Amino acid sequence: DGGITQSPKYLFRKEGQNVTLSCEQNLNHDAMYWYRQDPGQGLRLIYYSQIVNDFQKGDIAEGYSVSREKKESFPLTVTSAQKNPTAFYLCASSISPLNNEQFFGPGTRLTVL
Amino acid sequence: QKEVEQNSGPLSVPEGAIASLNCTYSDRGSQSFFWYRQYSGKSPELIMFIYSNGDKEDGRFTAQLNKASQYVSLLIRDSQPSDSATYLCALAIRNYGGSQGNLIFGKGTKLSVKP
């Protein structure tokens, strides 16, 4: 089945730790995105990537890092510099950077203990 | 600042009624608009997109776009309890000097369909 997978579904982090969220897609999509959703809030863009080995900061990139070494994979690292990391993290992809139809993975819920 | 505004709700409608969800936006340059459905605790699911002024129908869903008035709406006919969810409106923007079409999301409207 084609789709976007994210792991883990739930993640608990101690303060001061870096954690990495996985996002994989087998849709052959060029563009991938990371969003953060807080309760009662809309989605906010963290990072996006138009093509392999390229990525750009979104609106709230501070405290996060990404890589795009393979077309299928776009992992997000939440660093200790991110002051309020507890949130629902959503990965999305679209067939090309010019196509705005974005499809979402199931999400990872990160909680800082 | 480009913004997307939605009434947070909850919007409550009886089963079988028409649910009307509205969204206003501030960016006159936006060309495409998207509606996503998000069940509690789940990720957003793309329902419809619309690029041109007027109506676009897909099954029980109709998207309406009025660029002059800067609003887009989603009508759900014959509403079912399974339609109870939060509906997110999104518009596509272009980054300064770039070609990337990023989405700006509203905060969503919570719909409750009562049996």
Image (spheres, coloured by chain):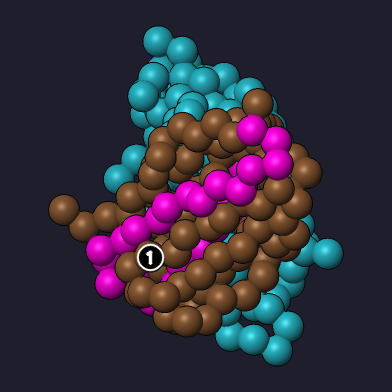
Chain colours: A brown, B cyan
- Label 1: chain? A
Residue B51 locus on image (x, y percent)? 50, 69
- Dot 1 crowding, Cα within 10 Å, few <14, some 14–19, many 20+: some
Q: Which residue is mark 1?
A: A73
Kindly identify the residue that appears in the image at 25 percent across and 63 percent down.
A26
Residue occupying image coordinates x 36% and y 24%: B82
Please state which of residues A47 and B17 is positioned toward the viewer in this rendering. A47
Instruction: Tell me residue B100's x, y (percent).
Output: 57, 79
The image shows residue B27, relative to residue A8, as above or below, that is below
> Which quadrant of the view contains residue B94?
bottom right
Left or right of A91: which side holds B9?
A: right
The quadrant of the image that shows the N terminus of chain B is bottom right
Instruction: Tell me which amino acid carries mark 1.
Output: Ser
Using the rendered image of the protein, determine whether residue B95 is visible from the camera's viewpoint. yes
B15 to A98, vertically: above or below = above
Q: Position of residue A53 (x, y in %)?
A: 47, 82
Viewer-nearest residue: A98 or A2: A2
Give the structural element (helix, strand or loop) at label 1: loop
> Does residue A9 appear to the left or right of B65 in the view shown?
left
Looking at the picture, tell me which residue is in the foreground, A52 or B53: A52
Comparing B113 with A35, the one in front is: A35
| Residue B100 vertical position relative to residue B53 in the rendered view, above or below | below
**Farthest-out residue, top:** B115
Is residue A100 within the magenta segment? no
Q: Position of residue B40 (x, y in %)?
A: 49, 27
Q: Magenta span covers which residues?
A: A14-37
List the single residue furthest toward the bottom.
B97
Which residue does the image show at 37% across and 28% down from the upper left?
B78
Q: Quadrant of the rendered structure where residue A93 is?
A: bottom left
Which quarter of the image is occupied by the C terminus of chain B? top left
Query: Per the image, is A31 magenta?
Result: yes
